[in-house]
Amino acid sequence: MLFLEGGRDGYSPEQCGRTMTVGELIAFLQDFDEEEEVYLRNDSGYTFGRITEECFEEEEEACPDCGEQECVCGEVEGCQ
């Protein structure tokens, strides 16, 4: 089994500091047996979680003017 320790670094992604890119994660995982099961480990092993395809969600960057995922201000080119 391979465990990914769930860290709590901030209340938003901007507060977390540097994180791995998809490419870095793929390169790192190449050293493991591809049949190895991967789990999230929280609170130093107090609770655990599974990782499935449904766990991944890609989020688009927010509009720099209004902060919304789907811009409502109309001030930025390409905004609604």
Image: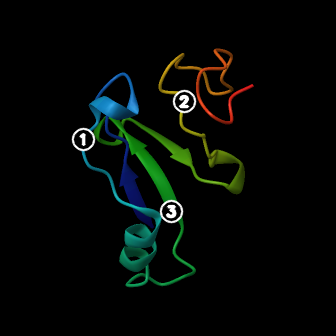
Identify the disc placed on residue 38: 3
Q: Nearer the viewer, residue 59 or 40?
A: 59
> Which dot, 1 or 2, sits closer to the camera?
2
Q: Judge whether 58 appears above or below 32 on screen.
A: above
The location of residue 41, given as percent across then percent down, is: 40, 46
Q: Nearer the viewer, residue 57 or 2?
A: 57
Identify the disc placed on residue 67: none
Q: Judge whether 60 appears above or below 8 on screen.
A: below
Residue sitting at x 71%, y 48%: 54
Q: Quadrant of the N terminus?
A: bottom left
> Left of 75 or right of it: where is 13?
left
Q: Nearer the viewer, residue 55 or 74?
A: 74
Identify the disc placed on residue 62: 2
The location of residue 60, given as percent across then percent down, is: 60, 40
Q: Earlier in the sequence, mark 3 or mark 1?
A: 1
The location of residue 13, given as percent across then percent down, is: 38, 34
Task: Assess whether mark 2 and mark 1 are in contact (beta carbons under 8 angstroms).
Answer: no
Q: Earlier in the sequence, mark 2 or mark 3?
A: 3
Q: Residues within 10 Å of mark 1 (few under 14, many from 20)?
A: few
Q: Residues within 10 Å of mark 2 (few under 14, many from 20)?
A: few
Q: Secondary structure at mark 3?
A: strand
Residue furthest to the right: 80
The location of residue 68, given as percent across then percent down, is: 60, 20
Q: State which quadrant residue 71 falls in.
A: top right
Residue sitting at x 24%, y 41%: 17
Q: Which residue is mark 1?
A: 17
> Left of 53 or right of it: where is 13?
left
Look at label 2 and name its amino acid. Answer: Ala
Q: Earlier in the sequence, mark 1 or mark 2?
A: 1
Q: Secondary structure at mark 2?
A: loop
Residue sitting at x 68%, y 16%: 72
Look at label 1 and name its amino acid. Answer: Gly
